[in-house]
Image: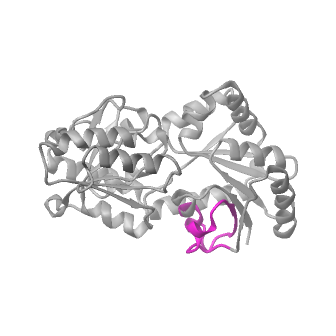
Amino acid sequence: MKKILVISSASIHTKKFIDMMQGHFKVYLITNNRDVFKDCEIEKTYEWDKNPLKNAWRTKQILKEIVPDLIHIQQVGLLAFYYTFLLHRHYRILVTAWGGDIMEFPYINKFKYWMTKYTLKHVSILSSINSVGMMSVMHSLTDFKREIIPINFGVGEYISFEDKYLNKENIIYSPRSHDDLYNIEMILHSFASFIEKETQWKLYISGFPHPTNTPKLKALSKALGLEQFVNFVGTLSQEEHAKLLHRSKIVVSVPITDGRPISVMEAISSNCTLICSNILANEELVSHGVNAIIIDHTKIFDFGLYHQVDINLQTNYNEAISKSFSYVNAQKSFIHTMERIFNDSYYR
């Protein structure tokens, strides 16, 4: 059985990649928080050292111990640049782009642009979440000289379709990170205006706690008088996340930029009405007035616009489109991609 060393910061998305490989590959992991992956089938998990020099030595010791057939780095960014610089001369590296790492990170400054280009040039194999916008940007960053393998991420294995919309509760669910990119502050301000008119709603905000943003967001919620209406539920398991989607009438996802957003696919697959930002990644998946309201993410928006969506039309649309998002199909596609990487001489 082939051995894959996954290198990634702690993320529910990385956990999904690892879960999809169960029984097909021996998976090892280097991360910053092993607790997130405690339920995964992993041969061994290592935590990286925050000191770059000490971590370089530690990584080389880990690689001597494992002797992996492939290194799979999640997300293009500082982490990918560091490990690519350290390892690309001696190991086969696959890097997978997720979203902001390609759509935003390279354009922050010239140095990050150079780091991104270096990573994309020197890794063995490139892949991306299957998004038209993502693939276009990656092609331009590689000067159209590299093949980029699309990966269909798929929804969580516990996601199920709810065709009886009236069974859902008056819950608005924000399943995105608390990083600035995801506009949670704008969501709170918009919800504060909405709750003045429709007081029966609750807002649930999940997401891995951010050391500075999460306390600020909680303080803002209190300042806006939203404490009885807003629940910060923290990091949810895949099963807990699926249950909350099943209960929620509305899912809000208004990032500044994004790749192919799994949260939007999962909301569609749970038959939630979506409030989305007007970016290409969302418009690839939703239809304004049919199953979503597309808003300007730079301004306070009106949650009340959800009334414009015809629920019967939404249900038919969501049920049809969500069939291609299934976990089983995504897993089959991903395993096929990984086997192709190992078997096709083009990638050796």
Q: Which residues are magenta?
A: 16-42
Q: Position of residue 90 (x, y in %)?
A: 87, 52
Work out whether 209 lies above or below 120: below
* Residue at screen point 50% across, 54% down: 153
Most foreground residue, 160 or 346? 160
Taking the image as shown, residue 248 lies to the left or right of residue 20, namely left
The colour scheme applied to this rendered structure is: one colour
Most foreground residue, 283 or 77? 77
Q: Is residue 47 visible?
A: yes
Taking the image as shown, residue 325 lies to the left or right of residue 65, namely left
Screen quadrant of the N terminus:
bottom right
Q: Position of residue 127 (x, y in %)?
A: 63, 45
Q: Position of residue 83 (x, y in %)?
A: 77, 49
Residue 41 included in the magenta stretch of the image: yes
Work out whether 64 lies above or below 8: below
Residue 154 included in the magenta stretch of the image: no
Work out whether 108 lies above or below 190: above
Taking the image as shown, residue 173 lies to the left or right of residue 49, namely left
Most foreground residue, 226 or 83? 226
* Residue at screen point 73% across, 59% down: 48
Count of numbered circles in the view: 0
* Residue at screen point 67% across, 56% down: 340
Q: Is residue 177 visible?
A: no
* Residue at screen point 78% across, 40% down: 122
Q: Position of residue 266 (x, y in %)?
A: 37, 55
